[in-house]
Amino acid sequence: MEQNLVLEALKFMILGMGVVFTFLIIMVYALKVQAALINKFFPVAEKQPIKKVPTQVAASDTAKKVAAISAVIQHHNNLKG
């Protein structure tokens, strides 16, 4: 009697795993077909390369940034003490 139940359980296990495996295989191929259809009807436009324009920072801008940073640091230090 127990052996019969074990065999029955093995049958259900193999059947269940077979169904899941079959579903996954079908899903993989369905997704491949879907990707092919999407690429066919909605192709992705190639992006144009961005031309990099060298930016030149003026000396006065750098001096202004250094002055602003220095002022902030000095203000912060004055708040502490």
Image (cartoon, rainbow, N blue to C red):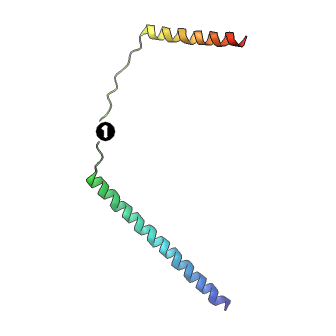
Q: Which image quadrant: the C terminus?
A: top right
**Residue 58 quadrant:** top left
> For the point 30% across and 53% down, which residue is it?
39
Seen in the image, is 6 located left or right of residue 25?
right
> For the point 32% across and 28% down, which residue is it?
51
- Residue 52 in percent (x, y) is at 34, 26
* Viewer-closest of 71 and 32: 71
**Residue 33 quadrant:** bottom left
- Residue 21 in percent (x, y) is at 48, 71
Badge 1 density bin: few <14, some 14–19, many ≥20, Cα 10 Å:
few
**Residue that protrudes farthest toward the right in the picture:** 81
Numbered disc 1: secondary structure: loop
- What's the residue type where badge 1 is placed? Lys
Residue ID for mark 1: 47
* Viewer-closest of 47 and 79: 79
Please determine whether, in this image, residue 20 is positioned above or below residue 47: below
> For the point 45% across and 70% down, which residue is it?
23
Please determine whether, in this image, residue 43 is positioned above or below residue 20: above
**Residue 59 quadrant:** top left
